[in-house]
Image (cartoon, grey):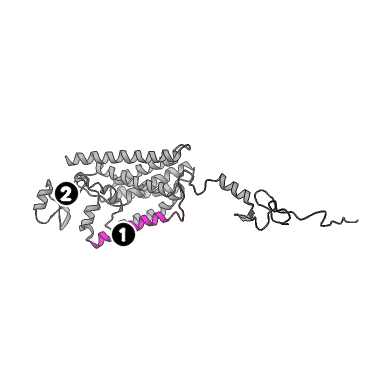
């Protein structure tokens, strides 16, 4: 049986669709058209032609998280590392200036009502003393509070720690949870969850705790991240078991870990994280960013109003 003979004239080499006359055996992985080395654009698999690259760029919202917001430009761990660094620096300053007895502790901690504390033992105070009486009493120190106008404490308390185990546990939790939340919703929304959860934590503390107690630590904000992560996982139909295990362990520790743990702060932070997370995930697609930031503003205004109302009540 004889076999046909083919010549180059019968089957000419393909030419680049953008540069006629340039023979090539490379084709665009997306449209299949032949492309010469000058037109090749490296893709995830093989090469694409310039037209397909431009079309893909127009069809894809570059660098956008699924629910709005820009993805982190470098790594989703960067913001978490910065937050951890701030907490560690503040803890170091408190430790170097006296720890529990440091003036920074009283300045940064969340105190609903001002107290006249014994300088040598901050756990003891002079009941009913005013600022003037405290200043005139030897060995006593007047502590600022939200009732006396120290409103910065509603946020600074979320970055202050005294005990090394306290900051260690909180920062490990932040390291594991923070990047997951930032990866899903972007850096600015991640920070919104963190800071607004710290704010709702403070509101819960000033209303539900004894006015003479002082609260500090990042736990409320971290509970907020766990609450937001729970909402995210439910929204994308993911496996909620890991998040529920984290919440369960922390809930047990909150209520069985001793009287020094603020369940009020943890509860307030968790509620804040769930609410802010829901705002991010459930905002309408049309004008999503606008609805999200309006929601964040509403949470902030309501929370600040609650804190201010309590401050007025305690100061009267």
Along the viewing direction, whichever of 187 and 34 lies nearer the viewer: 34
Task: Provide residue 299's location: percent of width, then percent of height.
Answer: 34, 40
Q: Is residue 251 magenta?
A: no
State the mark number for residue 115. Answer: 2
Mark 1 sits on what residue? 89
Residue appearing at x 39%, y 54% in the figure = 80
Magenta residue span: 70-97
Across the whole image, how many numbered discs are drawn on residues? 2
Residue appearing at x 19%, y 45% in the figure = 148
Q: Identify the main secondary structure in magenta.
A: helix
Along the viewing direction, whichever of 176 and 294 lies nearer the viewer: 294
272 over 39 or under it: above or below:
above
Q: Is residue 247 visible?
A: no
Q: Is residue 178 left or right of residue 113?
A: right
Task: Provide residue 143's location: percent of width, then percent of height.
Answer: 18, 51
The span from disc 2 to disc 1 (Cα, nearest Å) is 27 Å
Task: Provide residue 237's location: percent of width, then percent of height.
Answer: 49, 42
Along the viewing direction, whichever of 5 and 54 lies nearer the viewer: 54
Q: Is residue 88 magenta?
A: yes
**The residue positioned farthest toward the right in the image shown:** 1
Mark 1 residue element = helix
Residue appearing at x 20%, y 44% in the figure = 147
Quadrant the N terminus occupies: bottom right
């Amino acid at each position: 049986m004889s076999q046909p003979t083919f010549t180059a004239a019968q089957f000419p080499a393909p030419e680049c669709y953008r540069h006629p006359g340039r023979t090539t055996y490379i084709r665009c992985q997306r449209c299949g058209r032949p492309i010469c080395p000058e037109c090749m654009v490296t893709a995830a698999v093989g090469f694409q032609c310039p037209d397909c690259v431009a079309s893909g760029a127009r069809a894809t919202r570059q660098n956008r998280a699924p629910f709005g917001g820009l993805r982190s430009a470098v790594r989703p761990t960067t913001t978490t590392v910065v937050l951890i660094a701030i907490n560690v620096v503040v803890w170091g300053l408190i430790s170097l200036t006296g720890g529990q007895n440091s003036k920074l502790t009283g300045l940064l901690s969340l105190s609903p009502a001002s107290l006249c504390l014994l300088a040598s033992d901050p756990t003891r105070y002079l009941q009913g003393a005013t600022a003037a009486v405290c200043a005139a009493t030897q060995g006593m120190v007047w502590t600022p509070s939200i009732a006396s106008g120290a409103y910065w404490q509603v946020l600074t308390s979320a970055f202050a720690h005294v005990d090394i185990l306290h900051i260690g546990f909180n920062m490990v939790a932040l390291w594991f949870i923070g990047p997951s939340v930032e990866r899903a919703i972007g850096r600015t929304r991640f920070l919104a969850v963190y800071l607004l959860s710290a704010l709702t934590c403070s509101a819960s503390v000033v209303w539900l705790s004894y006015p003479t107690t002082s609260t500090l630590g990042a736990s409320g904000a971290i509970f907020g991240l766990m609450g937001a992560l729970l909402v995210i996982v439910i929204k994308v139909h993911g496996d909620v078991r890991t998040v529920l295990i984290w919440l369960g362990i922390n809930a047990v520790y909150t209520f069985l870990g001793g009287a020094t743990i603020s369940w009020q702060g943890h509860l307030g932070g968790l509620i804040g994280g769930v609410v802010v997370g829901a705002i991010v995930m459930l905002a309408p697609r049309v004008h999503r960013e606008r609805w999200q930031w309006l929601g964040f503003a509403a949470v902030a205004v309501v929370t600040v109003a609650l804190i201010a109302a309590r401050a007025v009540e305690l100061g009267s």
